[in-house]
Amino acid sequence: MDIACVGGGPANLYFSILMKLADPAREITVYERNPAGSTYGWGVTFWEDMLLALHGSDPESARAIVAGSVSWDSWAAHIHDRSTVILEHAEEGLGIGRRELLAILAERARSLGVRVEYEREITGQDELAGADLIVAGDGAGSVLRERHAAHFGTEVTTGRNPYVWLGTTKVFDAFTFAFTETEHGWIWCYGYAYGADRSTCVIECFPETWRGLGLHEANEADTLALLEKLFADILDGHPLIGRGQAEGGARWLNFRTLTNRTWHRGNLVLLGDAAHTTHYSIGAGTALALGDAAYLANALHNAPGLPDALKRYERERMAAIRSTQRAARYSARWYENLPRYIGLPPLQMLTLLGRRHSPLLSRIPPRLYYGAGWLGSQVARVVVPGR
Ligand SMILES: Cc1cc2nc3c(=O)[nH]c(=O)nc-3n(C[C@H](O)[C@H](O)[C@H](O)COP(=O)(O)OP(=O)(O)OC[C@H]3O[C@@H](n4cnc5c(N)ncnc54)[C@H](O)[C@@H]3O)c2cc1C
């Protein structure tokens, strides 16, 4: 079986690795439109469950990913000038630079015999006529999917709040949240380390705040200067880093949650963000993309033919990610409803931030939810400095 993978993101690189491990004789080519080493985004988080799954599928790339990551096991939340709350020994998280992750996966794929062709943009399936299977791992804006949008039943919901994905030279010890009140409303950020000298910062606010602060018309330098001032408490004098004017500057976006009714059409199958996106605030998109790769590889090995394998992949994977997609929707809504939580005592606010994926939280008054006793042991680990 000849396989053409369109897009050299985490989904397709990992899929190509798993397919080669299972059958080295397969011809697999990954086509990536960008040059090697160039990518959008900064660091991505992942959690122990993903690590276990990676070790189970390919211990060699899992070890390289762990070696290239940094970890934390506490949270810190700075709530304007009211207080800082630290949650110690929370769930352990890891961060890795997107560039490092892609380099590790591409290197592993190549060592197994996968052809990885950079600077090769695919605009239609006809360019890949000889392939038995075409895997569209070309991200949320997938061209291969959009050509058949009616067949795939693509639906997009656009989030209300603008956000921007930045880097900083400040290395956060904990997964750090900061909520800042301005005369135009709240603006918040979360940051986490992903290397010895870098962290990611994702900044979000209400559209009214964004316009009120003039961020809708500011250039990159002015945007970064204003944000550095607003988040001075957590940055400790370190700069925020954008993408530079050559790459379009610090781009504010509204997150697009994308779903598809079906994930395959003939020998074309969707993988990762091309198939579904989940709000960034739960830090799961990359893990889901890698999980898709494992499910698709597994279905291809175990089903009797391609049509059955693609149906099985779609059925099993759609079911497996449903709860994460739901959690992401509730998490996005938590931030959109920030005024509901921001006035709570800081300790309660951070605890409910940790529960933002809960379907119940949006239906029950926050104080009642907090007081109901379901949060038990987590509250006991909260420390409020200076109190
Ligand atoms: C602000 C933000 C923060 C995030 N944080 C996290 C996080 O902490 N943890 C996490 O797990 N996930 C996070 N994510 C999500 C994560 O980045 C994506 O879910 C993940 O990258 C999806 O992987 P993918 O391989 O499906 O697609 P992508 O990573 O988008 O890769 C697609 C690739 O296809 C290439 N391509 C596109 N079209 C073509 C074409 N026509 N021909 C050839 N190549 C093409 C692109 O250049 C790209 O390299 C975050 C996302 C955002 C927006």
Image (cartoon, rainbow, N blue to C red):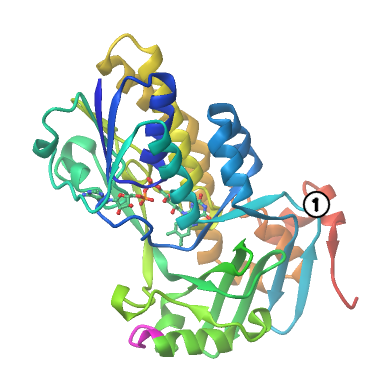
Q: Position of residue 168 (x, y in %)?
A: 55, 74
Amino acid on which the number 1 mark rests in the picture: Gln
**Residue 213: within the magenta?**
no
**Rendered residue at 72%/85% (across/down):** 81
**Residue 217: within the magenta?**
yes
Q: Quadrant of the C terminus?
A: bottom right
Q: Position of residue 62 (x, y in %)?
A: 57, 38
- Is residue 358 visible in the rendered image? The answer is no
**Rendered residue at 25%/48% (across/down):** 142
For the record, the magenta segment spans 215-220
> Residue furthest toward the left?
126
Q: Secondary structure at mark 1?
A: helix
**Rendered residue at 55%/83% (across/down):** 239
Residue highlighted by disc 1:
378
Q: Is residue 169 left or right of residue 157?
A: right
Q: Give the quarter of the image for residue 106.
A: top left
Q: Is residue 84 left or right of residue 128?
A: right
Q: Is residue 280 left or right of residue 173?
A: left
What secondary structure is the stretch in magenta mostly built from? loop
Q: Quadrant of the N terminus?
A: top left
Tell me: residue 151, above or below residue 180.
above
